[in-house]
Image (tube, rainbow, N blue to C red):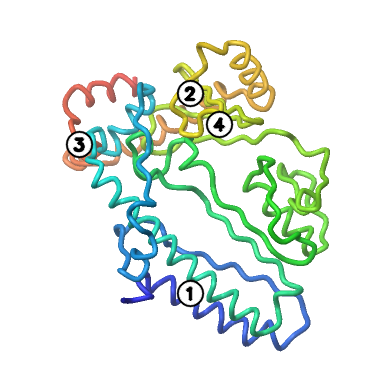
Amino acid sequence: KSTRVRMQDWGRVDEAVAWLRRNARASEAPFFMHLGFTQPHPGDGFRTSPHYRDMITEERVTLPEKDREIHPVMAYMRATKNCVQDFPDAEVRRMRRHYFAMIAEVDAMVGEVLTAAESMGLLANTYFIYTSDHGEMGLEHGQYLKNALYEPSARVPLAMRGPGVPAGSVVDAPVSLLDVFPTLMEMARLAPPDFLEGRSLLPLLRGGDAGRPDWVLSQYHANMQNTGSFMLRRGDWKYIAYAGFEPQLFNLREDPGEMHNQAACRPEVRKEMDARLRGILDYEAVDAHVKDYDRASFRRWRQEASEEAYRSTMTKLFRGWGEAQFEQIEAWLR
């Protein structure tokens, strides 16, 4: 049973351990190391081995709820991801089990680095931060990949250890990846630039930071989606505004699977969350700016590409692309 499946990532682990042995142990000078993994990114498929798969017993793999209604923007996203069909429960369970097994291999990689650091006597005075750039839809809401602002995609792991970080403590306050850089600055005893939006996480870990905003913002404008989306998380509430479409409003404590859009039945919360979002940024103006950029970029590519290359590329966007979509494109460009 192989314990090393993703050899590229294990090579990075070996390089990191070797670097620590060459540099960190031999010097009292501060050091910084960033170690990134491609795992568990399924870019080259959901590959694992029996060693990790057997760690994830099948009965522990839950099946996600199925949407009672599908938001129009999410319907478009499902089409562009070619996942409009219903997947059999057995296939969903198998895919999720493989993905969890891939995460188990990442745990082994992180453990290898921590074990090496411990053997060098570095744990007492070294900070470790573990996080990710995005999550993965494990067929929640009938989707795979990322892109959506649902929790499986937008919420990421964040774990820290080091001097002054209480072991086993859990902070429930919403935070952002924008907070990582100022956290590193404080760890290095450096003053962060004034223009940063994020704030150091260290005061939160010590039970303070009363001045921190009680919300976090995320937005998405890239592929798989037909308009800009803007998410505001505050307390139990999560509000997603879609430019040109109706919003979504979820209470994550009552509805962690984000199955019940309460935008219509809780108009007072919708109004308050929308006002707060607009107080942070004019999301309709941002979306208009992005769409102007997209249109100009597409028009330039369209003019430079041959007719054959243009039609071939567009028909690969999603299953069912046809002449009606080409006509919509031409209308959009005018």
Residue 211: image x %, image y %?
Answer: 82, 38
How far apart are the alpha carbons under marks 2 and 3? 26 Å
Residue that label 1 marks: 12
Residue 86: image x %, image y %?
Answer: 23, 34
Front label number (1 vs 4): 4
- The reply, left or right, for residue 87 in relation to residue 3 is left
Graded by Cα atoms within 10 Å as few (under 14), some (14 to 19) or many (20 or more), the crowding at tag 2 reads many
Front label number (3 vs 1): 1
Ranked by sequence position, the earlier of labels 3 and 4 is 4
Residue that label 3 marks: 315
Query: In the picture shown, does residue 92 fall above or below 221?
Result: below
Residue 45: image x %, image y %?
Answer: 29, 58
Q: Residue at x 49, y 48 (%)?
A: 134
How far apart are the alpha carbons under marks 4 and 2? 19 Å
**Three-letter code, disc 4:** Leu
Residue that label 2 marks: 242
Residue that label 4 marks: 252
